[in-house]
Amino acid sequence: MSDLQALEAETLGAVAAAGDEAALEAVRVAALGKKGSISALLATLGKMSPDERKTAGAAINALKDKVSEALGERRTMLKERALEARLASETVDVTLPVREAAIDTGRIHPISQVMDELTAIFADLGFSIAEGPDVESDDYNFTRLNFPEGHPAREMHDTFFFAPNEAGERKLLRTHTSPVQVRTMQKTNTPPGASWIAAGQTPPIRIISPGRTYRMDSDATHTPMFHQIEGLVIDRNIHMGHLKWTLDQFIARFFELESVVTRFRPHHFPFTEPSAEMDVQCDTSGGEVKIGQGTEWSEIVGCGMVHPNVLRNCGIDPDEWQGFAFGFGVDRLGRLKYGMPDLRDMFASDTRWLAHYGFSAFAAPNPASGLS
Ligand code: PHE
């Protein structure tokens, strides 16, 4: 076998053995590159006699063409093979079910939903929103709300207290949203820009205040953190009739009923006089609570006329202004409307629970399009 034939066999063998385009390129450079084996042979032509050059030149050029052609074919083949492998690995089974988008599976927590419903209803009744901090002073949570120093009602609230600070002041986690009443009425005494005060609150006042509250308590109907919504109206000549109308309106709208039957039961809160609890007509005979029918009563809200001492403690003259206040348990309202059996599940962060009881993000409640 001549040198040329050996080179041909070797180069074509290398072309055939190249497994991918990079290996093939290496073979091309080794044969036809500037310092390649065939290029080196072509360079020898210059030193040959014209006769030698004629035969050798033809043979070397024929080899070069053969190798180029083999390279081209192999490259095309490798390209096709790579494409096929890619197509095979990237196949999409178009018959598979489409995975639901997060926007469709994500859920609004029932507490958020109920809060939005409450806000929508009270906004429609002309109330604005006020907020207060979860960490409160003893003064706002108790003293200014007419809880006497050392009064057992302070203990009955099962308060979470913080360790006293250097000044001996003991902060606490608010046990109800009623301190927001004080903060709202006291607006003139609060630092400018304090965010928890609804704008421009000198009487008349008409606010609601939804938020978190805390008490040391945990069973199927109590969680250590729960939610309340406070209501406060201060104006001239306000009486219990206004309170009853407002609560009846709210309860009927919240439960999406034409009207409801309610009753006041005498009660005691230090910050209201007279104080009452309101019950709503219901039927529990079928195992679940149905509001607005039957012959039973379900306690639904604590309320009363704002105590003159509280008005005085907040710098409002009780001879000129009167008002009413009320406080709903938001979680309880949610349970009554949407029927969750155990309150503790609400805060267990179980996505299965949320998928079942949650609401679509696209169904924001408002009085025009409906609540739920
Ligand atoms: N703060 C009371 C409670 O937590 C509820 C309430 C609010 C009662 C306003 C009367 C007026 O039980």
Image (cartoon, rainbow, N blue to C red):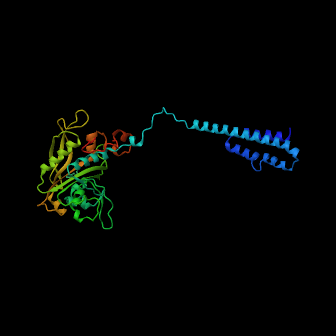
**Image quadrant assignment for residue 289:** top left
Q: Is residue 173 left or right of residue 23?
A: left
**Residue 311: x and y, percent?**
17, 60
Q: Is residue 7 left or right of residue 132?
A: right
Residue 266 appears anywhere in the view: no
Instruction: Tell me the residue at 20%/49% (across/down).
Output: 125
Residue 317 appears anywhere in the view: yes
**Residue 350: x and y, percent?**
38, 43
**Residue 158: x and y, percent?**
27, 53
Quadrant occupied by the C terminus: top left
Q: Is residue 184 above or below residue 329?
A: below
Q: Is residue 246 left or right of residue 132?
A: left
**Residue 24: x and y, percent?**
70, 43
Instruction: Tell me the residue at 20%/51% (across/down).
Output: 126
Instruction: Tell me the residue at 21%/52% (across/down).
Output: 127
Residue extending furthest bottom? Answer: 167
**Image quadrant assignment for residue 283:** top left
Quadrant occupied by the N terminus: top right
**Image quadrant assignment for residue 97:** top left
Q: Is residue 222 above or below residue 162?
A: above
